[in-house]
Image (tube, grey):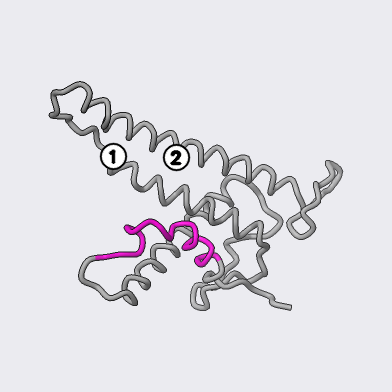
């Protein structure tokens, strides 16, 4: 039985989630291999940030900080539910990094019907609402995760003293 989980397992699931985002995988004037190296470095940073978020928001049955940087793996086997949870948090953090790039754009078009078709302020609010939604969903997922046994996925009893 496998005693640890490679970071690559988490990265693969995260990459499947962002596969249609050209900004994550494509860079100008570099090879596909080099672009993938950069994507892995970015994913590693997001994973470690996601671990910090998870460990800050709850006290899991395992310590997600228990990983080997050299071998790039957790020193225990993580479950599919934990992989999904980490990927969801990574995705939220990835999107939130783009919030700083959102600046109100002065709309120079004068025709009101053209302005109605494209509103930078509306686009900004929609993006921020998406980030807030993802954060709320992740909060719910963390609450459900911490209330269940990580291996059996059964609800913990209020009498459990772990």
Q: In the picture shown, does residue 114 fall above or below 59?
A: above
Left or right: where 39 falls relative to 107: right
Residue at 69%, 75% (x, y): give it. 3
Quadrant hosting residue 39: bottom left
Q: On screen, 82 above or below 76?
A: above
Please tell me whether residue 16 belongs to the stretch shown in magenta: yes
Mark 1 element type: loop
Image x and y of residue 45, in percent: 43, 61
- Could you tell me residue 19's position as x and y percent? 43, 60
Mark 1 or mark 2, earlier in chain: 1
Examine the residues drawn in magenta and state their main secondary structure.
helix
Q: Which residue is mark 1?
A: 102
- Answer whether residue 20 is magenta in the image: yes
Residue 23 falls in which quadrant of the image?
Answer: bottom left
The residue at which mark 2 appears reads as 131
Relative to 66, 50 lies left or right: left
Circle 2: is it few (<14), some (14-19), or many (20+) Cα within 10 Å? Answer: many
- Report how many numbered discs are placed on residues in the image: 2
Q: Dot 1, how many residues are within 10 Å of its Cα: few (below 14), some (14-19), or many (20+)?
A: some
Residue contact between numbered discs 1 and 2, judged by CB atoms under 8 Å:
no
Give the camera-side residue of 35 and 158: 35
Residue farthest front in this picture = 113
* Rendered-image quadrant of the N terminus: bottom right
Name which quarter of the figure residue 68 lies in. Answer: bottom right
Side of 48 relative to 37 (left or right): right
Q: Which residues are magenta?
A: 10-27
Q: Residue at x 73, y 56 (%)?
A: 150
Identify the disc placed on residue 141: none
Q: Nearer the viewer, residue 129 or 4?
A: 129
At x 57%, y 44%, the residue is: 138
Give the percent coordinates (x, y) of residue 33: 34, 77
Cα–Cα gap, marks 1 and 2: 13 Å
């Amino acid at each position: 039985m496998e005693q640890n989980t490679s970071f690559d397992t988490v990265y693969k699931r995260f990459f499947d989630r962002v596969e249609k985002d050209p900004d994550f995988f494509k860079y100008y004037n570099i090879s596909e291999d080099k672009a993938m190296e950069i994507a892995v470095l970015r994913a590693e940073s997001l994973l470690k940030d996601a671990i910090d978020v998870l460990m800050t928001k709850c006290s899991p049955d395992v310590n997600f900080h228990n990983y080997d940087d050299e071998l790039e793996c957790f020193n225990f086997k993580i479950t599919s539910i934990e992989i999904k949870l980490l990927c969801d948090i990574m995705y939220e953090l990835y999107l939130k990094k783009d919030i700083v790039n959102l600046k109100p754009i002065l709309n120079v078009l004068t025709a009101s019907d053209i302005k109605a078709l494209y509103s930078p302020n509306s686009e900004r609010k929609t993006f921020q609402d998406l980030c807030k939604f993802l954060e709320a969903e992740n909060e719910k997922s963390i609450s459900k995760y911490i209330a269940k046994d990580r291996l059996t996925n059964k609800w913990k009893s209020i009498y459990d003293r772990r």
